[in-house]
Amino acid sequence: MRTALRLAVAERDEQEGLCLVLSLGWYWQMRDLKIEARNWSREFMALGPDPFPEPAAPRGRCGSAARTRRRPGPERCSKRPGAGCI
């Protein structure tokens, strides 16, 4: 199994390596091989993109005025009697 893991790392085959790691997880846990499980998991995690990139920089204040401005809505009955009431 280690040969298959090493080959997947050498070929940078993240998909195959993750399948192997997930399949071997029960074996490593049963045999108390936590360090080996952690090391192989890190090897394959390093092959893929970061799932938690840094948040994007704020865009500025251009959209803030549009969010705070009230949209015109239907008039209330108390403002103009006789106008179309809601």
Image (cartoon, rainbow, N blue to C red):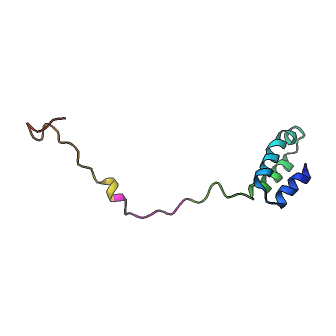
- In screen coordinates, is 48 left or right of 61? right
Say which of 5 and 26 sits in front: 5
Q: Magenta segment: does it hold 23? A: no
Say which of 54 and 1 sits in front: 1
Q: Residue at x 84, y 38 (%)?
A: 26
Q: Residue 13 lies in what quarter of the image?
A: bottom right
Q: Percent position (x, y) of residue 68?
A: 32, 53
- In screen coordinates, is 64 left or right of 8? left
Q: How many marks?
A: 0
Residues in magenta, as a range: 55-64
Among all residues in the image, which is located at the extreme top? 86
Answer above or below: position of 75 versus 38: above
Answer above or below: position of 39 versus 81: below
Answer above or below: position of 77 versus 8: above
Q: Percent position (x, y) of residue 50?
A: 66, 57
Q: Main secondary structure of the magenta part?
A: loop
Q: Quadrant of the C terminus?
A: top left
Q: Residue at x 11, y 39 (%)?
A: 83
- In screen coordinates, is 47 left or right of 85? right
Q: Residue at x 44, y 63 (%)?
A: 59
Q: Magenta segment: does it hold 58? A: yes
Q: Percent position (x, y) of residue 34?
A: 84, 46
Q: Percent position (x, y) of residue 37?
A: 83, 48
Q: Residue at x 59, y 60 (%)?
A: 54
Q: Residue 29 lies in what quarter of the image?
A: top right
